[in-house]
Image (cartoon, rainbow, N blue to C red):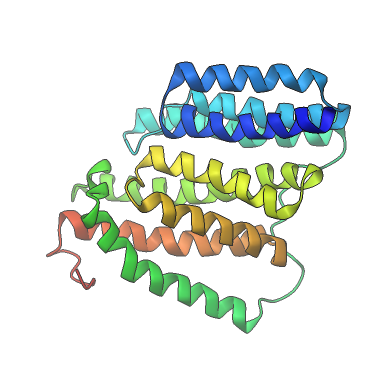
Amino acid sequence: MKKWIELTVILLLSISAITLIGLQLHVIGWSLLATGAFLLLFSRKQFKKDFSLLYFSIGLLGITPITTDISYQHMFIMGIPLTLAITIPYLVSRFIYKDHLVHFKFHHGRSWYKTEIFYIFITALLAYLILPFFLKNTDSYLNWTVTTETSHIIRLFIGTNFLGIWDELFFISTVLGILRRHISFRFANIVQSIMFTSFLYELGFQGWGVIMIFIFALIQGYVFKKTESLFYVITIHLTLDFILFLALIHAYYPELMPIFLR
């Protein structure tokens, strides 16, 4: 019986991420999240402890104004709950549960293989070919505001990189790390990818971008499993985000960034 309850808790966590964060259907999203939190009471002790951290974090994201606004005020308001979403599970796991389930393993203790370095270049190439087309084809670039003001460009660069690092710390390290304790990696990776995609959908990657992001999240989870290196998956993500940064400028001011095919 508890097994089915726990599977329902995981399912409700995934759906609440879609509705509450991705689609911004607050009544439905909070209802699903509350139902899942209630069912946690009837699960195994360890499962309850671990998933309460995930439900808490998703609740934080539910009250976070997730937008691409890069004004100083919004970056501060949005940054606080995002930071808490990764620091509180870490602190609770380390100092209260004392099981170190949530931890940030940045290096795997070896040099990168040639294939791993090659994959970063492949990521850059695919991002170069796909992102400018995606932004224009779906009009998703309009979800960002880009001006030529120096301060704005700097904040755009900082904002895209901060969120790229946060994505890996939260979805790949925290969420996937907790899920892997209780379900198979394949299932856990699908769940974190759903949550990853929901967040980035609300952030601005809409249209067929959800498919692109879902595949990217799946691959990131698999790469992290193979390398156990946050530094490596963050490098991959920041490589993509750098191309995104340039592609956004190009979308608004193609004459200033004439480096893309479109």
Provide residue 12's location: percent of width, then percent of height: 62, 29
**Would you place residue 110 above or below residue 204 in this image?**
below
Looking at the figure, which quarter contains the N terminus? top right
Q: How many marks?
A: 0
**Would you place residue 95 above or below residue 140 in this image?**
above
Which residue is at a point 58% across and 50% down the rendered structure image?
168
In the rendered structure, the answer to whether residue 190 lies left or right of residue 109 reads: left
**Would you place residue 126 above or below residue 30 in this image?**
below
In depth, the one of 257 and 56 nearer the eye is: 56
Provide residue 180's location: percent of width, then percent of height: 76, 48
Which residue is at a point 82% across and 25% down the rendered structure image?
43
In the rendered structure, the answer to whether residue 130 lies left or right of residue 120 reads: left
In the rendered structure, the answer to whether residue 184 lies left or right of residue 114 reads: right
Which residue is at a point 34% across and 39% down the rendered structure image?
68
Q: Is residue 88 visible?
A: no
Provide residue 186's location: percent of width, then percent of height: 69, 55
